[in-house]
Amino acid sequence: MTTKSDASWQMSRRSALEIGSGLFGLNLASALAAASTAARQSSKSDFSCIFLFLAGGASQYETFDPKPEAPVEIRGLWSPIRTNVPGTLICEKMPLMARRMDKVAVIRSWQGKSGAHDTASQHVASGFLPPRTGQHFPNFGCLISALYDSRVPGIPAHFGLPVAARYTTPPGYLGPAFDAYNVKEDPSAGKLQANKLTLAPIRFEDRHSMLLQLENLARLHDLGTASQILAHDKFSDEAVALLTSGAMEHAMNLEAEPIELRERYGMNVVGQRVLLARRLIEAGARFVTVNHAVQGGLFGEGPTNGTWDNHHLLFDSMTSFQEVPRDIPGGYKWHSNRGPGNLPQLDMSLSTLLDDLESKGMLETTLLVVMGEFGRTPKINKEGGRDHYPNSGCLLIAGANVRRGVVIGATDKTGSAPKTRPWGPEDVAASIYHALGIDHHATYFPRLPRPTAIADGEIIEGLFS
């Protein structure tokens, strides 16, 4: 017979799991439900994503939405070129992509809400405009890694190269246990030391703490299934496999690739990170974010702080960092680099990635998204650059049932605003989840006073076949 005193220590499995939400920084009941839901997902759950984040905000005029009929102070110094899609023009500095536009879709009526790097980046990386208190919603890769286990033991579900989107707190409400695995080394500098890769201390401590607390919960009278929870705990399995399987060491060995292919990607930090992204997806990762942080120019001194944030000397930074331009703004230093500038790096790595994915039969199962946090101003400023401009921009999407050779939406004659229906970060988020076989209307992790779906937008009309 159970005494009143004994009963005071008894609790239901549901109550224990609710306590778990406070102990672990993650609603365990929701996590288990999500795992169950993931197991029931369609075959699209095998789809993956490479997100090329053009950190700092790339200019739509100098990439995929040139305005040849606009005044020179708007259209810039370069002319557009024809592509292999009749009627579609892109910047002349991207000749390799001009021959591959039949593989991609371009959304030209993109529109954001914030002109600040941090807020806009968080908006773009999660699909939700962050509250004033900071980022709450997780980046795409973190949420996907929470919904789905790794495809292959020893390969984490989510990577950041070198980080999972700058200016963001990637895991948001999911907590540090679902942060990305960041590979901050420069893959162009030599063989990556994958054998030295270890779990970040905070991630390992969170997992270890979670396991200890689950063991304690297992002692509760009504928590009869705790041993099953432990047996299927994705965190312990992931940690052990990562450190013992050797899968990561194999995936990160770029020297296994033909030198001709590596050179096509570009023997620079960006090109080799894009190649590494393909190898990680091929090895079993679900989501890889590559920060296209070019090394050189006014802001390119370190391994993660290169940028497309070209307020000054845009046309110099876009092409080469080798020669120091005249008229550098006061207080700035030019960081010379023998490698190519923003546009050649993007043109080489993106065109090669498309070819590579297609030749390996991976393009139909790999979503490719290329975008920054906002566009750039229509008028070139007195420093020869363009400033932040969320009102208009463009992005490129390919693979995973995305229609090929299409242009969705358009801007007015000066590129100042969309003249067709605008598509925002919320809609890009809904489209990403749709491509990966995830119901964006569903509430997988209810951490707000009211249930909130993982995306608040609509699938971009005309994007999918």
Image (tube, rainbow, N blue to C red):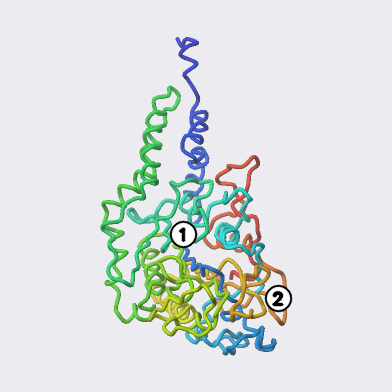
Query: Where is residue 265 drawn, in percent x and y?
Result: 39, 78
Q: Residue at x 48, y 71 (%)?
A: 299
Q: Residue at x 44, y 27 (%)?
A: 223
Question: Which residue does the numbered mark 2 point to in the structure image?
Answer: 416
Tags 1 and 2 touching, CB below 8 Å? no
**Residue 66 lies in quadrant:** bottom right
Question: Which residue does the numbered mark 1 point to in the structure image?
Answer: 164
For this rendering, which residue is in front, 420 or 314? 314
Q: Residues within 10 Å of mark 2 (few under 14, many from 20)?
A: some
For this rendering, which residue is in front, 382 or 11? 382
Gap in angstroms between the C-alphas marked 1 and 2: 30 Å
Amino acid residing under circle 2: Ser
**Residue 122 lies in quadrant:** bottom right
Query: Where is residue 459 drawn, in percent x and y?
Result: 63, 63
Asked if 444 appears above or below 277 in the picture, the reply is above
Sequence-wise first label, 1 or 2: 1
Q: Which numbered circle lies on residue 320?
A: none
Query: Where is residue 113 drawn, in percent x and y?
Result: 67, 62
Amino acid residing under circle 1: Ala
Work out which quarter of the rendered image holds the N terminus and state it.
top left
Q: Residue at x 51, y 34 (%)?
A: 22
**For residue 93, side relative to residue 225 (left or right):** right
SS type, badge 1: loop
**For residue 64, side relative to residue 20 (left or right):** right
Query: Where is residue 152 drawn, in percent x and y?
Result: 35, 56
Q: Residues within 10 Å of mark 1 (few under 14, many from 20)?
A: many
**Residue 300 lies in quadrant:** bottom left
